């Protein structure tokens, strides 16, 4: 999948699987921007790695004590969601906005 759809798919997969401790999961992605960082925070994942990360994603991880190993820091991503969420700090509001843009139902955070 493209864009942020894999994170929505991961949420769907994890929903109803109460035996999985999300804090024990490790997420790997090719690139993480601010939108993905807020989604990862909402998913409850505490460790991740990426080849490239937006400088706008770093504060999200730092404030939430999420460990992220990364290669290259990009000043920003050339992506509309990077701009829309530039000042957003609430992962629930970010998720709702992104779900609307992706035409996904908004689900409660487990």
Image: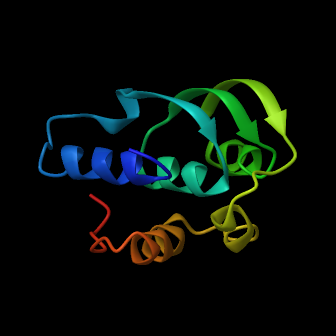
Q: Is residue 65 above or below residue 63?
A: above
Would you identify the image quadrant in which residue 104 lies? Answer: bottom left
Q: Position of residue 39 (x, y in %)?
A: 49, 54
The way the protein has been coloured in the rendering is rainbow
Q: Viewer-proximal residue, 82 or 46?
A: 82
Q: Is residue 43 left or right of residue 69?
A: left
Q: Is residue 11 above or below residue 92?
A: above
Task: Name the quadrant containing residue 67.
Answer: top right
- Give the quadrant of the N terminus: top left
Q: Which quarter of the figure has residue 86?
A: bottom right
Q: Nearer the viewer, residue 99 or 47?
A: 99
Q: Please state the horizontal and vertical placement of residue 40, each as a whole percent of the image.
A: 49, 47
Q: Position of residue 60 (x, y in %)?
A: 68, 51
85 displayed left or right of 22: right
- What residue appears at the point 75 percent right and 43 percent down from the top-left corner? 58
Residue nearest the observer in this picture, 66 or 13 = 13
Q: Residue at x 70, y 61 (%)?
A: 82
Look at 53% across and 69% down and name the residue there.
94
Q: Position of residue 110 (x, y in %)?
A: 26, 58
Q: Which residue in the rendered view is the most extreme toward the right?
A: 75
Query: How many labels sit on residues?
Result: 0
Residue found 15% across the figure and 43% down from its top = 18
């Amino acid at each position: 999948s493209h864009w942020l759809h894999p994170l929505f798919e991961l949420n769907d997969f994890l929903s109803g699987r109460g035996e999985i401790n999300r804090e024990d999961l490790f997420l790997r992605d090719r690139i993480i921007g601010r939108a993905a960082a807020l989604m990862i925070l909402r998913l409850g994942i505490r460790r991740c790695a990426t080849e490239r990360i937006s400088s706008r994603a770093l504060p999200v991880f730092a404030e939430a004590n999420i460990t992220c190993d990364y290669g290259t820091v990009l000043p920003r991503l050339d992506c509309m969601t990077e701009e829309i969420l530039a000042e957003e700090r609430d992962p629930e509001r970010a998720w709702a906005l992104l779900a609307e843009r992706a035409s996904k139902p908004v689900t409660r955070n487990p």
